[in-house]
Image: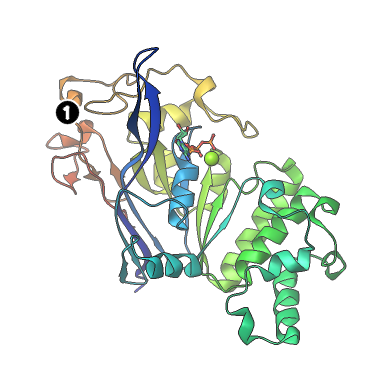
Amino acid sequence: MNEPILEVENLTVQFKRKTKLFKAGREQERWKKVLDSISFNIKQGETFGIVGETGSGKTTLARTLVGIYRPRECRIRLNGKHLDLNKKEDVLLLRKNIGIVFQDPVGSLNPRVTVSEIISEGIPDQKKLSERQMEAKIMEASELVELPGSKLESFPTELSGGEKQRVSLARTLVGGKKILVLDEPTSSLDVSIQAQILNLLLRLKNELSISYIFITHDLNVIKHMCERVAVLYYGQILEQGNTYEIFEHPRHPYTADLIGANLSFTSNDGFSAARESGEPSREGCIYQNSCSKKFLQCEKPPPTFDLGKTLVKCWLYDYAGGDHGESVDGRNGGSNGASD
Ligand SMILES: Nc1ncnc2c1ncn2[C@@H]1O[C@H](COP(=O)(O)OP(=O)(O)OP(=O)(O)O)[C@@H](O)[C@H]1O
Ligand SMILES: [Mg+2]
């Protein structure tokens, strides 16, 4: 059986922000919760999508999963082993296993070093390897991502956007990482180049049996790439499960609004301009201020209901009969990981 290789439970991330209450007043420290009790899991060879509009917390999630941010709360298991992200060795283990490709290849590649040196950054235990072994690994990784050998001595400024993203990928793959977090990996590229990179990612996934956490605001990319998807709204997963099921039968009113809004394929600004929305609610259901299906119960935080192929955080599915589901996390508004 294909067990999850990564299990994330109740991941909560908050940032400190300084505010001045009065003009002459002292600065006060407040916390802003950017991810709120999110849970999901990923299996080997699977692509799990995270879709959400701008500011929903996608990049924060990506950075937390590679140990850049420390969560306030989280239970995380990697290949069945529980990790304590307060311990340095566990964070190192996380980084050894999970790689990241950022949206902006320009900002993530050091312009002063050659492509070959950039790729070599991803090789663990370099001191144990001879120069020849290092070169062989760099060549192998560049071939995997279809980067011509002639580019290895180039500098990032001499490469096209697509080539830069191939270098980022090679740097991640050269260390043998089995899970990649892809944070909008194609949104800075021209449409034709986007397609090339997406196809390369599909091929690599099949050949190497790696898993992707594919982060994007682009619903078409989700449909093309992901077996399962989670819909993120202001730090909460409102619905997750089988991609086909979610697109064909969106259960959460927010998901239905997103899909119904027929959002732009090329926009890099997120969805918010495409539909009218209220502010996220601080109490009860976070979507209630924009929801056309709101009713009295929505004043309370909804739990996540298991509808079989999808998990939905919405009181509509608390009804007995019809489309009802079973709460997977009690009545406290948490969420749980979906599986097919
Ligand atoms: N280091 C930080 N310190 C304080 N607040 C932050 C930090 N990083 C992100 N935020 C805030 O967290 C929220 C989520 O940001 P994040 O970058 O994760 O969103 P996103 O979904 O990736 O958006 P986009 O689609 O625009 O890339 C935003 O309100 C942002 O201002
Ligand atoms: Mg982002």
Total numbered badges shown on the rendered structure: 1
Q: Dot 1, crowdedness within 10 Å: few (<14), some or many (≥20)? A: some
Residue 51 shown left or right of residue 267 in the figure: left
Placement of the N terminus among the 4 image quadrants: bottom left
Give the image quarter of residue 90.
Answer: bottom left
Specify the color scheme. Answer: rainbow
Residue 122 position, x and y percent, is 62, 69
> Is residue 158 depicted above or below 300 in this figure?
below
Ligand 1 has an atom within 8 Å of the beta carbon of the residue at disc 1: no
The picture quadrant where one finds residue 142 is: bottom right
Residue 133 spot, x, y in % from top left: 71, 85
Quarter of the rendering occupied by the C terminus: bottom left
In this view of the protein, can residue 234 be seen by the observer? no
Which residue is tagged 1? 300
At 35% from the left edge and 22% from the top edge, which residue is drawn? 26
What residue is rendered at 42% in x and 18% in y? 277
Question: Foreground residue, 214 or 281?
Answer: 281
Q: Please, is residue 117 above or below residue 36 in the view? A: below
Residue in the picture at 86% in, 53% down: 158
Q: Amino acid at mark 1?
A: Lys
Q: Nearer the viewer, residue 207 or 71?
A: 71
Residue 208 appears left or right of 145 = left
Does dot 1 land on a helix, a strand or a loop? loop
Q: Is residue 265 visible?
A: yes
Q: Is residue 195 above or below residue 28?
A: below
The picture places residue 258, in percent across and down from the top left corner, at: 45, 30
Where is residue 204 shown, x and y percent of the image? 62, 66
Indicate left or right for 332 with 294 as reference: left
